[in-house]
């Protein structure tokens, strides 16, 4: 089960940071679902990186990040892990600020052939593969920073 393969991901421990559009989509999708992954997604404290605001009552345990999301993440990571779901631009901003220690990638066997790269030119990081494992129809890949 995928939820068992993500060490340290527990509802009381990790905030999840989403760009507003991703959060709005997930807020419509996840509250009505059931299962282990849905329970984790619904119970986890969620923080939304938004400049325009959102109705945080649409999805339980949600709140907007006050001010700059990168500064907030830098401070928050001293207390707990920060997980980014669905925002490549925020992942890039955190990497440029040297705030990424680990990537946990869940991929589906689909090749798009175009789009932005996670490891874009100019984004620092010396990461090593620590796990590559099939999990049902997906593959879990963990890359950890070599420090």
Image (spheres, rainbow, N blue to C red):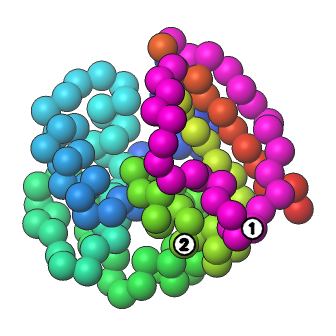
107 vs 119: above or below: above
Q: Which mark is residue 77?
A: none
Mark 1 Cα-neighbour bin, 10 Å: few <14, some 14–19, many ≥20: some
Main structural element of the magenta stretch: helix, strand or loop?
A: loop
Q: Residue at x 66, y 33 (%)?
A: 141
Q: Residue at x 17, y 76 (%)?
A: 53
Secondary element at tag 2: helix
Q: At which x and y percent is residue 93? A: 54, 72
Mark 2 Cα-neighbour bin, 10 Å: few <14, some 14–19, many ≥20: some
- Is residue 36 in sight in this rendering? yes
Per the rendered image, the range of residues in magenta is 108-136
Q: Residue at x 50, y 78 (%)?
A: 70
How many numbered badges does the structure rendering display? 2
Q: Residue at x 51, y 35 (%)?
A: 113
Residue 57, quarter of the rendered image: bottom left
Q: Nearer the viewer, residue 133 or 6?
A: 133
**Residue topped by disc 1:** 124
Q: At which x and y percent is residue 107? A: 52, 30
Q: Which mark is residue 93?
A: 2
140 vs 135: above or below: below
Is 25 placed left or right of 115 in the picture?
Answer: left
Secondary element at tag 1: loop
Q: Is residue 133 magenta?
A: yes
Is 47 placed left or right of 135 in the picture?
Answer: left
How far is disc 1 from disc 2 in space, using C-alphas?
A: 11 Å
Q: Residue furthest top?
A: 136
């Amino acid at each position: 089960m995928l939820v068992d393969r993500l060490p340290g991901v527990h509802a009381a421990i990790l905030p999840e940071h989403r760009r507003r559009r991703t959060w709005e989509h997930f807020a419509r999708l996840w509250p009505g679902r059931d299962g282990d992954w849905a329970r984790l997604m619904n119970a986890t404290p969620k923080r939304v990186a938004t400049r325009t605001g959102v109705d945080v009552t649409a999805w339980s345990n949600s709140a907007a990040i006050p001010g700059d999301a990168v500064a907030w993440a830098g401070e928050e990571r001293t207390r707990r892990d920060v997980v980014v779901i669905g925002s490549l631009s925020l992942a890039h901003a955190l990497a440029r600020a040297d705030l990424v220690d680990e990537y946990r990638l869940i991929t589906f066997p689909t090749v798009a052939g175009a789009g932005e790269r996670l490891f874009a030119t100019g984004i620092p990081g010396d990461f090593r593969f620590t796990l590559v494992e099939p999990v049902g129809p997906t593959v879990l890949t963990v890359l950890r920073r070599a420090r």
